Image (spheres, rainbow, N blue to C red):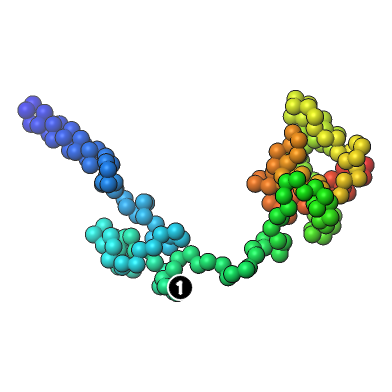
Amino acid sequence: MKRVISIYSIAVAGLALGLASCEAEGDYPGTEYAPQMYHSVPYEPLSQIRNEEEGMWLSNREDEKGEFYNSNPNNPHEMNMRKPVANTVPRNPDGMLPYRLRVADLEGAALVENPIELTDQVVAEGQQLYIQYCSSCHGAGGEGDGKVGAVIGGVANLKGGAYINLPEGHIFHVITHGKGRMGAHASQIPADRRWKIVHYVKQEIQAQ
């Protein structure tokens, strides 16, 4: 009986010691178990450790370097994340430049032409995107009678009044930045998809 109690006490003490060693305090991060889950072997873009022996005491890397070493010897100055060439402008895979018109510049937006070539496939894709992102407010037919639109009110009827004659650039601008009750959708919908929605609105919804 005493032996059982002794074994139990040792197990409890060991568990308590193990849990206590995990506690972080001040500059001490606590004992790490399975360190490979915490320290990634691939290059970290925003940190730079050039000492190949840093973290050697816990490393099991195949390249026999320290656990924390993360420099890229193939780039100048062992850089991991290289800066873009000066005066370059990023483009998306379709070659489109970033959309930089300000929220209030609706006049400028009206002059922007749709860079996506109009095809049946593009219109079909635009329809699916419209159903996914727009129909809940504007309704399946664009008349502002979606289920959400019916609750919040004031949703634009894309088939009515001045909306029929809105330039494509204007519609894209509103999808991007929002207007009135409509919020900005640039963070949810990539630019090329926004233009496809515009094609669908102009070619299908407003053409009916």
Q: Residue at x 73, y 53 (%)?
A: 101
Judge whether residue 140 can be spotted in this image: yes
Q: Which residue is drawn at 18% across and 33% down?
A: 12
Given residues 191 and 31, the one toward you in this image is 191
Q: Is residue 9 left or right of residue 173?
A: left
Q: In this view, does 194 lie above or below 16?
A: below
Q: Is residue 119 above or below residue 15?
A: below
User: Helix, strand or loop at disc 1?
Assistant: loop
Residue density around tag 1, few if under 14, some if 14–19, many if 20 or more, within 10 Å: few
Q: Which quadrant holds the C terminus? A: top right
Residue 7: percent from left, percent from top = 12, 34
Given residues 95 and 124, the one toward you in this image is 95
Q: Name the residue under label 1.
A: 75
Q: Which quadrant holds the N terminus? A: top left
Q: Identify residue type, mark 1.
A: Asn
Q: Which residue is drawn at 31% across and 68% down?
A: 52
- Quarter of the rendering containing residue 143: top right
Given residues 52 and 204, the one toward you in this image is 52
Judge whether residue 139 can be spotted in this image: no
Q: In this view, does 8 lie above or below 130?
A: above
